[in-house]
Image (tube, rainbow, N blue to C red):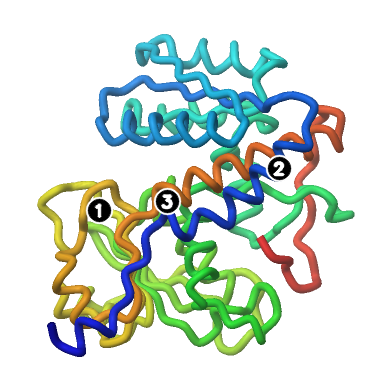
Amino acid sequence: MSAAIKACKVIPASKIAKTYLQEVTDATARLARKPKLVGLLANDDPAAMMYATWTGKTANTLGFQYELIQVSKDQLEEEIYKCNNNDDINGMIVYFPVFGNKQDQYLQQCVSIHKDVEGLNFKYISNMYHNVRFLDEAKTMKSILPCTPLAVVKILEYIGAYNKVLDNGDRLYGKTITIVNRSEIVGRPLASLLANDGATVYSADINDIQLYERGDGLRYKQHKVLDCNKSLEECARISDIIITGVPTKTYKFPSEYIKRGAIVINFSSEKNFVDEDVEKVASLYVPSIGKVTIAMLLRNLLRLMDNKKAVNAKSVEPPTAPTDKPQDI
């Protein structure tokens, strides 16, 4: 084994998740009753079933109640509203994609804002894209962020990609990142979160590459989206961090594009890298993130419960963008 291979550290998601799972366990132990999470499954995607199984096992281990409800596509909307109206249910996750079109976006908005552990409600999404971290002007209720993008952020914090010398909201300043995935559930929100924290982000999908950035220096608190004429190879070779999420068995990110010493993360249920090739050039490699995603989902559930209690289950008007620096997420 060469020295180059030894230089790369492979970090399992289970190790990273431990810190956040302990936080969730401690918070759950202080509650009078077990929080209840419901998963709604209306597709036959093996990856969704695997995620549902992991979620159930983890939730039950940490003192939550978890119920998986399998329904047909036609029954899904009705089941969502049943869960919305059931006070025994504290949070809900719908395993997308279901229809694979705009109907999925409609179903995301059917989930009550008070039970949306995935952070897909329009109010949460709007806050995220506008770099608004709170639901209220008093900053007592944090907005919910999508679980998988949030998991990637927490992984980057854990492995030291965030510069803690800088203020919250600026800690990725100077970092260049390439993301191969621009889905509305993960890729696009992730690019926005990282750009809002100061990074220059190249967002690649099958059609094109977009540039997400806040502009020169630390002047802007909200990112911009620009056209990009660089190739994937050009973007990757200048990137400190490469993140992939291509949900197909056949896709493999070209290892020769990876900058020496880069951080590499895969959030797809499929392996997007040839492990031995990545380990020859990357400094840190996280081959999967599922367990961290589940930790963020349960963390979001507890936050939803706190937020709902604070507003007595009443809706909150979208706040204006804050003028001071964003807080930690």
- Return the residue at label 1: 246
SS category of the residue bearing label 2: helix
Quarter that holds the N terminus = bottom left
Q: Which residue is mark 3?
A: 186
Residue 214: horizontal and vertical position, in percent? 56, 77
- Seen at 23% across and 58% down, the residue is 207
Q: Which mark is residue 303?
A: 2
Q: Nearer the viewer, mark 2 or mark 1?
A: 2
In the image, 242 versus 2, the foreground residue is 2
**Helix, strand, or loop for circle 1?**
loop
Who's the residue at 28% across and 46% down the image?
269
Q: Are marks 2 and 3 in contact (CB under 8 Å)?
A: no
Query: What type is the residue that disc 2 sits on?
Result: Arg
For this rendering, which residue is in front, 96 or 50? 50
In the rendered image, residue 254, in percent from the top left (x then y), is placed at 14, 71
- Which quadrant, please, contains the C terminus? bottom right
Q: Is residue 190 visible?
A: yes
Asked if residue 102 lies left or right of residue 169, the reply is left
- Camera-side residue of 185 and 39: 39
Amino acid type indicated by mark 3: Val
Count of numbered marks: 3
- The crowding category of the residue bearing disc 2, from other C-alpha atoms within 10 Å (few below 14, some 14 to 19, many at least 20), is some
For this orientation, the residue located farthest to the left is: 250
**In 3D space, how far apart are the residues under numbered discs 2 and 3 (Cα atoms)?**
20 Å
Instruction: Judge whether 233 appears above or below 189 on screen.
Output: below
